[in-house]
Image (tube, rainbow, N blue to C red):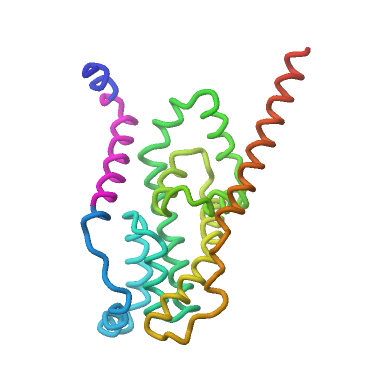
């Protein structure tokens, strides 16, 4: 077993993939042990930062998302600091930056290793990711399967294209960004909760149904094509 591991680790792609796994694991550990600030205390911090607050919110939010902090917390904090609509805008910008960073890291550290080893159904799934358009990314993003940062890393290891991934990531984040920013704003201004705060509800279930239907149809087409080829 150990000689096999040693041979594997002599491959540069395996070393890079190991670094990716260790990075994700380290972020997960930090997420468990580092306490999160109370969103109600964030407006005071923003006052101390002055004009640098928007830049700090975007860059800090992006780094926290890459470190696997849930996007819900980032959006709540943005809403508490900036209000519902402006907070949603900054949260979405942070999500865009974080998606680009996570995808790039996953692509550089994990894609070569994964591409060389996927077979059978996994290869077909990888091909599905490679053919995805913006709607496919939106559907996956809305599924409650993993956090924002982890999905970004994972997408980077697939054959997915960057631009559809970024566009789909931001579009999928819009409803929950508006909803959670409104809730965050209500922490400091209780009268600011609006009807759109309920927008995130049910989107994950809808996305799950759409994704299952798309995968089922793709598998049925593949089997039909294979049957036709075998008949010749």
Give the x, y percent position of residue 218.
Answer: 67, 35
Q: Is residue 225 above or below residue 129?
A: above
Identified at 48% across, 84% down, the residue is 192
Image check: 39 left or right of 206? left
Residue 55 at least partly seen: yes
Q: Is residue 172 magenta?
A: no
Q: Nearer the viewer, residue 39 or 221?
A: 39
Main SS class of the magenta portion in the image: helix
Indicate the position of residue 207 as horizontal and vertical percent values: 59, 52
Q: Which portion, as a residue range, is magenta?
A: 9-29
> Residue 149 versus residue 110: which sits nearer the camera?
149
Query: Which is nearer the eye, 83 or 47?
Result: 83
What's the residue at 49%, 80% (across, down)? Answer: 193
Quarter occupied by the N terminus: top left
Say above or below: 217 vs 55: above
Answer with left or right where residue 16 lies relative to residue 178.
Answer: left
Dividing the picture into quadrants, the one containing residue 21 is top left
Residue 127 at x, y percent in the picture: 57, 34
């Amino acid at each position: 077993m150990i000689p096999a591991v040693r041979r594997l680790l002599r491959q540069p792609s395996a070393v890079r993939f190991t670094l990716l796994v260790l990075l994700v694991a380290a972020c997960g550990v930090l997420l468990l042990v580092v306490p999160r600030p109370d969103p109600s205390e964030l407006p005071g911090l923003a006052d101390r930062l002055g004009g640098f607050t928007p830049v700090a919110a975007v860059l800090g939010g992006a780094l926290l998302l890459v470190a696997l902090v849930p996007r819900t917390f980032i959006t709540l904090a943005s809403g508490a600091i900036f209000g519902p609509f402006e907070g949603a805008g900054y949260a979405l910008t942070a999500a865009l930056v974080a998606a680009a960073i996570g995808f790039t890291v996953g692509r550089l550290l994990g894609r070569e290793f994964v591409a060389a080893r996927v077979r059978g159904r996994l290869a077909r799934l990888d091909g599905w990711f490679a053919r995805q358009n913006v709607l496919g990314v939106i559907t996956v993003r809305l599924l409650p399967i993993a956090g924002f940062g982890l999905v970004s890393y994972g997408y980077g290891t697939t054959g997915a294209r960057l631009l559809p991934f970024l566009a789909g990531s931001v579009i999928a984040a819009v409803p929950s960004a508006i909803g959670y920013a409104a809730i965050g704003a209500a922490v400091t201004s209780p009268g600011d909760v609006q009807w759109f705060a309920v927008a995130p509800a049910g989107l994950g279930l809808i996305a799950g149904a759409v994704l299952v239907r798309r995968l089922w149809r793709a598998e049925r087409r593949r089997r039909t094509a294979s049957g036709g080829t075998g008949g010749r």
